[in-house]
C-alpha cells in the first residue's frame, strides 16, 4: 500500500476518576478549551488545530500511560515553546512534575494529571 487511508489523529481518550475535577484541571492548569462536557465525557481542544483530548470517567484502576519494567511511560506528549515557563507554571499549581531533561538538542519533562496519567511536554 503506497498511501494510508488515515489522514490524521483526531482525538485521544484519557481515563479519569472525577470528570468535573479533571475537566477543570485540563482547562485551568493546561489551558485547553472545553468544547463539550456531558456525564459520559469531556471534550477538550488543543489550540486551534483539529486535535481533541477526550476525558472518559472510569472507576477502574487504569491510566493513559503504559509501563516498561514496572515504570510508567508516557503515551501523550505535548509541545511547548516556553518549556521552562510551563514547567514552573505546573510547579506553581502543585502538579507532580519531574525535572527538565535534555537529549540530542531537545528538552522535555514528565508530569502527572490529577488521575495519575503520566504526560510529557517537550521542545
Image (cartoon, rainbow, N blue to C red):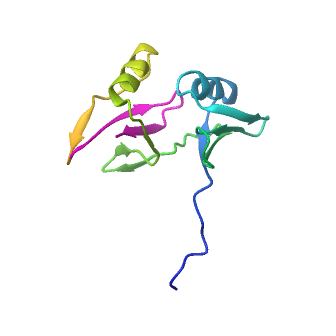
Q: Is residue 5 left or right of residue 70?
A: right
Q: Residue at x 37, y 22 (%)?
A: 85
Q: Is residue 14 visible?
A: yes
In the displayed structure, 5 sits above or below 23; it is below
Outermost residue on the bottom side: it is 1
**Percent position of residue 88, x then y:** 37, 19
Q: Is residue 57 visible?
A: no
Overall secondary structure of the magenta stretch? strand
Q: Is residue 67 left or right of residue 102?
A: right
Total numbered badges shown on the rendered structure: 0
Q: Residue at x 60, y 41 (%)?
A: 15
Outermost residue on the top side: it is 92
**Percent position of residue 42, x then y:** 71, 36
Q: Report which quarter residue 83 is drawn in.
A: top left
Q: Where does the C terminus fall, quadrant-wise?
A: top left
**Percent position of residue 21, x then y:** 64, 23
**Percent position of residue 25, x then y:** 58, 24
Q: Report which quarter residue 9 is drawn in.
A: bottom right
Question: Magenta residues?
Answer: 105-123
In the displayed structure, 105 sits above or below 30; it is below
Q: Is residue 108 magenta?
A: yes
Q: Residue at x 45, y 49 (%)?
A: 75
Q: Is residue 22 magenta?
A: no
Q: Nearer the viewer, residue 75 or 44?
A: 44
Outermost residue on the right side: it is 38
Q: Residue at x 46, y 15 (%)?
A: 93
In the displayed structure, 58 sits above or below 20; it is below
Amino acid at each position: 500500500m503506497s498511501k494510508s487511508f488515515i489522514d490524521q489523529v483526531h482525538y485521544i481518550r484519557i481515563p479519569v476518576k472525577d470528570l468535573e475535577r479533571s475537566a477543570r484541571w485540563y482547562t485551568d492548569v493546561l489551558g485547553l478549551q472545553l468544547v463539550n462536557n456531558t456525564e459520559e465525557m469531556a471534550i477538550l481542544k488543543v489550540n486551534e488545530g483539529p486535535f481533541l483530548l477526550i476525558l472518559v470517567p472510569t472507576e477502574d484502576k487504569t491510566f493513559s500511560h503504559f509501563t516498561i519494567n514496572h515504570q510508567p511511560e508516557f503515551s501523550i506528549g505535548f509541545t511547548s515553546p516556553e518549556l521552562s515557563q510551563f514547567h514552573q507554571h505546573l510547579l506553581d499549581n502543585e502538579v507532580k512534575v519531574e525535572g527538565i531533561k535534555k537529549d540530542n538538542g531537545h528538552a522535555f519533562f514528565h508530569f502527572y494529571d490529577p488521575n495519575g496519567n503520566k504526560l510529557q511536554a517537550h521542545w
